[in-house]
């Protein structure tokens, strides 16, 4: 898949599998950006992901770090692909997202932080 930057320079889009995104994030080579809405993020999120909801998404407000890649994710991959298109339209060089979103992340057995709906307790398998 490709997007076109101003001047018709193709910008390849990378659909990363969850394990690749996890390895990049945990090795400090990437920053994860969650484009879901605040309620979804509060209920369950990927450890270390920053929230930038699609409903108020501004590609120019993303924390661009020239030493680490930005990887977008959402619930299933649809909204993060939309956010990538918005990045392209704004000329922001973000080209990667998690294929299948947080659903694929969980299916791959990767950790998330969630709230227990009965008690409100934070369930974080990385915190011991």
Image (spheres, helix red, strand yellow):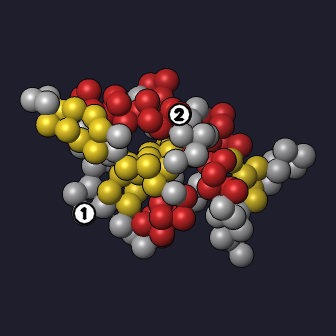
Q: Residue furthest bottom?
A: 128
Question: In the rendered image, is residue 113 in sight?
Answer: no
The circle drawn on residue 38 is none
Q: Residue furthest front?
A: 1
Between 10 and 63, which is closer to the camera in this rendering? 10
Q: CA distance from mark 1 to mark 2?
A: 27 Å
Report the number of discs. Answer: 2
Pinpoint residue 4: horizontal percent, then vertical percent: 22, 32
Q: Considering the numbered disc 1 on the image, is that residue within a helix, a strand or a loop?
A: loop
Residue 128 drawn above or below residue 52: below
Pinpoint residue 84: horizontal percent, then vertical percent: 37, 36
Question: In the rendered image, is residue 3 in sight?
Answer: yes
> At 74% across and 56% down in the image, what residue appears?
122
Residue bearing the label numbered 2: 78
Identify the image quadrant of the C terminus.
bottom right
> At 50% across and 50% down in the image, what residue appears?
98
Residue bearing the label numbered 1: 67
């Amino acid at each position: 898949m490709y997007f076109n930057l101003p001047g018709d320079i193709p910008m390849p889009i990378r659909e990363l599998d969850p394990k690749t995104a996890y390895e990049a994030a945990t090795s400090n080579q990437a920053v994860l950006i969650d484009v879901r809405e605040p309620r979804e993020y509060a209920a369950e999120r990927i450890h270390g992901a920053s929230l930038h909801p699609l409903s108020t998404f501004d590609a120019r407000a993303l924390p661009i770090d020239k030493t680490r890649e930005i990887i977008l994710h959402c619930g299933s991959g649809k909204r993060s692909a939309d956010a990538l298109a918005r990045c392209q339209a704004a000329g922001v060089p973000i080209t990667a997202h998690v294929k299948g979103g947080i659903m694929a992340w969980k299916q791959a057995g990767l950790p998330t932080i969630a709230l227990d709906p009965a008690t409100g307790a934070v369930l974080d398998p990385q915190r011991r």
